[in-house]
Amino acid sequence: MPTKPYRTVPGPSACSEDAEKNTEKEKIIMLFSKISGLTKTFCIMSMVGGVAASYPAHAGDLSSVLFEQQTWKEIQAETEAGVTTIIVPVGGTEQSGPYIAVGKHNTRVFSLAQQIAKKAGNTLVAPVIAYVPEGGTSPRSSHMRFPGTITLPPDVFEKLLVSAGESFQVQGFKLIVFLGDHGGYQKYMEKAAETLNHKWQGTGAKALYVPGYYTVIAHQYADWLKQKGYGKDVGMHADISDTSLMLAVDPSMVREQALRASGTPSATDGMYGGDPRRATAALGQVGVSMQVTAAVQAIEQARSK
């Protein structure tokens, strides 16, 4: 009589053998159940891990360069450890033609300021200043002639910058960097930096206005685009350079489908010269790199003095 595969010794009755069979089956079922459960757990953990990894650094994460994501204790610890440079990114809320969202400057300067801070090292990024001089309200002038624009009087804007700078200086920051993405307020940023530097004489603190972050677009980047055959597309506002920069930083801010299907742009659309229809993210990335490099160099030079 052949030996049963599930037994190695003779003995019990057929009833016992059936019970043995059932026990073995139960063990096998339990084993597969455990393996299945572990597999499911592993899959779920992998999914959760993947989602978590895709999130940006959040509050309390000291790897973040964002001032607003730190607690006051963490900010104090950072300044005491030598993180004494802070970038004040200045954007603006304005019309930018029919195809770019009105938060263009805020989105762009927020993104680039973080790149600059990481490259410069020992630097945090302050919350974006989104309300800036954009024209008059009575009568309506400049970008205020269009919906989607918010303006401040120049003197209020300048006082805002000075107050922000003083706030950072008293809590231990030594280099306060004003970085502006829009052309209309550059001179007020420069005046605010001058006011602060006059007040801070002998304190070791310094305010730095970085014109190169903005002027590199109107000069080096525009020249590069012209050399590449985009001369007729370069204008002053919402042109190929403006649109390409936005596509490089955040394409969701550009109504690209409507842009590609549009006709020749005009000033009545809020687009001052040039043509944005051939804009690409690849072209914009060149300008972004120029802006980041210009700002990092300015910060390094200021630190060396």
Image (spheres, rainbow, N blue to C red):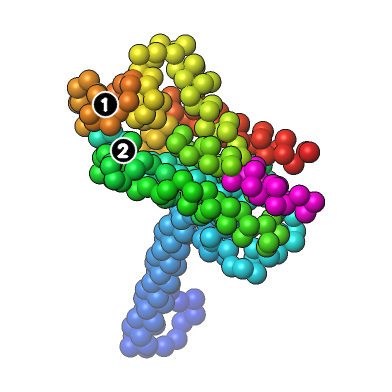
Amino acid type at image mark 2: Ser
- Quarter of the figure with the C terminus: top right
Is 112 situated above or below 232? below
Percent across and percent down for residue 291 are 55, 32
Label 1 secondary element: helix
User: Viewer-proximal residue, 263 or 144?
Assistant: 144
Between 104 and 120, the residue placed more toward the observer is 104
What residue range appears in magenta? 192-208
The image quarter containing residue 103 is: top left
Q: Is residue 28 above or below residue 161?
A: below
At x 28%, y 32%, the residue is: 270
Taking the spot 32% from the left edge, 25% from the top edge, the residue there is: 272
For residue 113, which numbered disc appears in the image?
none
Q: CA distance from mark 2 to mark 1?
A: 14 Å
Using a 10 Å C-alpha cutoff, classify the residue at mark 2 as few (fewer than 14 neighbours), some (14 to 19) or many (20 or more): few
Q: Is residue 164 left or right of residue 283?
A: right
Residue on which the image places disc 2? 141
